[in-house]
Image (tube, rainbow, N blue to C red):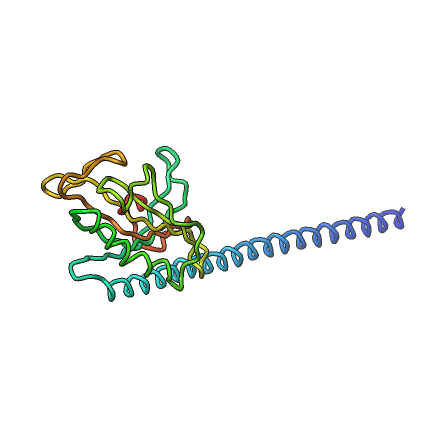
Amino acid sequence: MVKNINKKEKNTNKILKILSFSLLLVICLVGIFITGIYVFSTVFENYDHNKFIKLDKNMQSLYEQIKSEANEGDDWKYIAVCSKEYTGDFPTGEYNCVTSISMQKQIKSVDDLNELQAKYYPIIDNSEYLKEKSEIEIQLPNDFGINFVVSSAEKRYEEKNTGFSCRYIDKVFETDENGSYIESQYGTNIDVIGGAVVSLKCTGKTSEAWYKLSDNANLLIP
């Protein structure tokens, strides 16, 4: 009888040791898993942050180059902003972040437009930071640079150091007598004064707002 009791006690102690070891092993594995997630998240966050900082730095450098070669009176602007992404009325937890180099001015003829295109497109197209992703495309009805009408030309790039998508656009639009934008269809004749926008926008999606917050980064000119 005593032997049976001792045997049962040994078996019970053995089971308890196994259970204790198993519980300790589970706790260790959970701890390692949580630590791994934290480390991975931190590494990814730092990597993501560095990419957006690099994009901002490179686009500011290109902006300074454009300004240094700009015609007198051509007022170039630079901005880097992020906006919350929504599904319906609810934020997704992600942000759309944009760098924008842009200039807007009044023009009086298609020659003014062509002068802008000839001046600034080569600077952007030959930038050390951009890799061509498409040929320059003239939007229908293909009057850009030919007739003084609402029209545009655009080209797609990839920022070499970060892989972010960039879009160059040179656009001419109709304005009223005060120089305010008029919504018009492509191909609409511009009688006296129009407006032109030349810009380069680079965009990326992220889980953090690495630039200052804006209501909607996608509404930046153009």
Tell me the residue at 24%/49% (across/down): 197
Q: Is residue 200 above or below residue 123?
A: above
Q: Is residue 15 left or right of residue 89?
A: right
Tell me the residue at 39%/35% (across/down): 87
Give coordinates of residue 61: x percent, y percent.
32, 65
Q: Quadrant of residue 70?
A: bottom left
Q: Nearer the viewer, residue 149 or 42?
A: 149
Q: Is residue 186 above or below residue 118?
A: above
Instruction: Count the labels in the image.
Output: 0
Tell me the residue at 21%/42% (across/down): 148
Q: Is residue 93 left or right of residue 7?
A: left
Q: Nearer the viewer, residue 180 or 188?
A: 188
Tell me the residue at 32%/48% (across/down): 169
Give coordinates of residue 165: x percent, y percent.
42, 51
Q: Nearer the viewer, residue 10 or 14?
A: 14
Q: Is residue 191 above or below residue 123?
A: above
Residue lying farthest to the front in this orientation: 146
Give coordinates of residue 178: x percent, y percent.
10, 42
Q: Is residue 195 left or right of residue 201?
A: left
Q: Quadrant of residue 192?
A: top left
Quadrant containing the C terminus is: top left
